[in-house]
């Protein structure tokens, strides 16, 4: 995201910066898929399918931040690298400037954050198309994103909880924090404090689904002055309330030196938070090819010696 913000349009953009792409170490490539549905949100669909991918494998939907491209984010965050390593399809929705001048997903517009409508429905149609095309396991679909893409991740988890087994929200916003572009500014910074019940009720009202609910992994930089750290707290309160578990962690530890809190029930992690101490606004990455490493450094792709995509892949058992 750009900062400081000089206009409301920039303030609500959740800019995440342009990413430098790279060619995957495979004959496969990121390709555009057309005709995937009625596409009421007027989004573009890109997809990466590793060569020789068998049926029954998982899907990851990766949502870029403002001004970014689908391919740039998918590569920079490490998802293409991990798809090659472990074998899963990556769905890469892309915003168009006709919808938002900064190419941000419209996470604050009711018409795009309601089940069956707008951008949310377009993304759901991309998932359905990919299940049909690749024979993917419909029970192993996950969604993640950065900034505006992180906020849209929360939208997808709330509006299509029956579609996603889990989500990873990076520098994002709780579902229905904002109801308009003007409202989004205060959600981003300094953030809005709602009760866990208010937050959970917003999710429960988004569909007729009654459970089970997706697991949620929340990633936030402690020095983020674009999306305030309190948004991670709001997200944790929203999803612990939805899961019907306390909003206090059942355990805490450190991962790569960073605070990690787990909210579990029956021995299963339902919600978790990673606080990346000293990190500003961006996607945590750790470039390299060793275990635990992924991503390519760039604007808002921050080398902080932990790769969110790797840890999300482990949480979702994408290698299995």
Image (cartoon, helix red, strand yellow):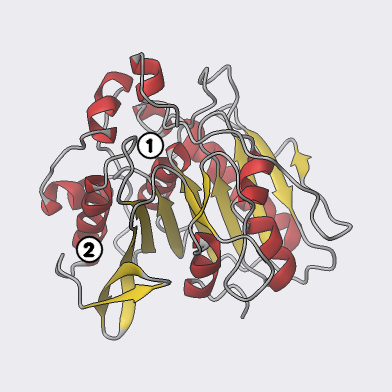
Quickly name the residue at label 2. 240
Q: Residue at x 22, y 63 (%)?
A: 240
Give the numbered dot on residue 95: none
Where is 276 relative to 115, above or below?
below
Q: Residue at x 49, y 64 (%)?
A: 306
Quadrant in which residue 26 is drawn: bottom right
Q: Residue furthest top?
A: 7
Q: Give the crowd class for mark 2: few <14, some 14-19, many >=20 residues within 10 Å.
A: many
Residue 222 locus on image (x, y percent): 30, 51
Quadrant in which residue 71 is drawn: top right
Query: Which secondary structure lies at badge 1?
Result: loop
Quickly name the residue at label 1. 114
Residue 115 locus on image (x, y percent): 41, 41
Quadrant in which residue 35 is drawn: top right
Q: Residue furthest right?
A: 27
Query: Which secondary structure lies at badge 2?
Result: helix
Residue 191 locus on image (x, y percent): 21, 37
How far is mark 1 from mark 2, CA to CA? 21 Å
Mark found first going from the N terminus, 1 or 2? 1
Residue 192 locus on image (x, y percent): 17, 37
């Amino acid at each position: 995201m750009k900062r400081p913000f000089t206009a409301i349009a920039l303030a609500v953009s959740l800019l995440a910066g342009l990413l430098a792409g790279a060619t995957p170490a495979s004959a496969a490539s990121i390709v555009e898929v057309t005709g995937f549905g009625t596409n009421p949100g007027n989004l573009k669909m890109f997809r990466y399918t590793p060569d020789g991918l068998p049926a029954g494998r998982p899907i990851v939907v990766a949502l870029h931040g403002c001004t970014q491209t689908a391919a740039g984010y998918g590569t920079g965050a490490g998802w293409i690298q991990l798809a090659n390593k472990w074998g899963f399809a990556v769905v890469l929705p892309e915003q168009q400037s006709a919808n938002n001048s900064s190419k941000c997903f419209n996470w604050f517009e009711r018409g795009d954050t309601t089940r069956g409508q707008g951008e949310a429905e377009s993304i759901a149609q991309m998932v359905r198309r990919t299940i049909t095309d690749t024979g993917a396991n419909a029970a192993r679909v996950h969604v993640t994103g950065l900034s505006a893409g992180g906020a849209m991740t929360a939208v997808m988890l709330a509006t299509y909880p029956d579609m996603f087994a889990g989500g990873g929200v990076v520098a994002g916003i709780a579902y229905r924090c904002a109801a308009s572009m003007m409202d989004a500014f205060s959600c981003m910074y300094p953030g809005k404090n709602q009760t866990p019940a208010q937050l959970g009720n917003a999710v429960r009202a988004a569909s007729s689904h009654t459970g089970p609910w997706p697991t949620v992994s929340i990633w936030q930089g402690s020095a983020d002055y674009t999306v305030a750290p309190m948004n991670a707290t709001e997200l944790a309160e929203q999803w612990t309330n939805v899961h019907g578990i306390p909003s206090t962690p059942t355990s805490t530890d450190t991962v790569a030196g960073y605070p990690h809190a787990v909210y579990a029930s029956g021995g299963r992690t339902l919600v978790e938070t990673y606080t990346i101490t000293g990190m500003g606004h961006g996607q945590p990455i750790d470039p390299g090819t060793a275990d635990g490493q992924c991503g390519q450094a760039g604007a808002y792709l921050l080398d902080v010696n932990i790769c969110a995509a790797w840890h999300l892949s482990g949480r979702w058992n994408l290698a299995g």
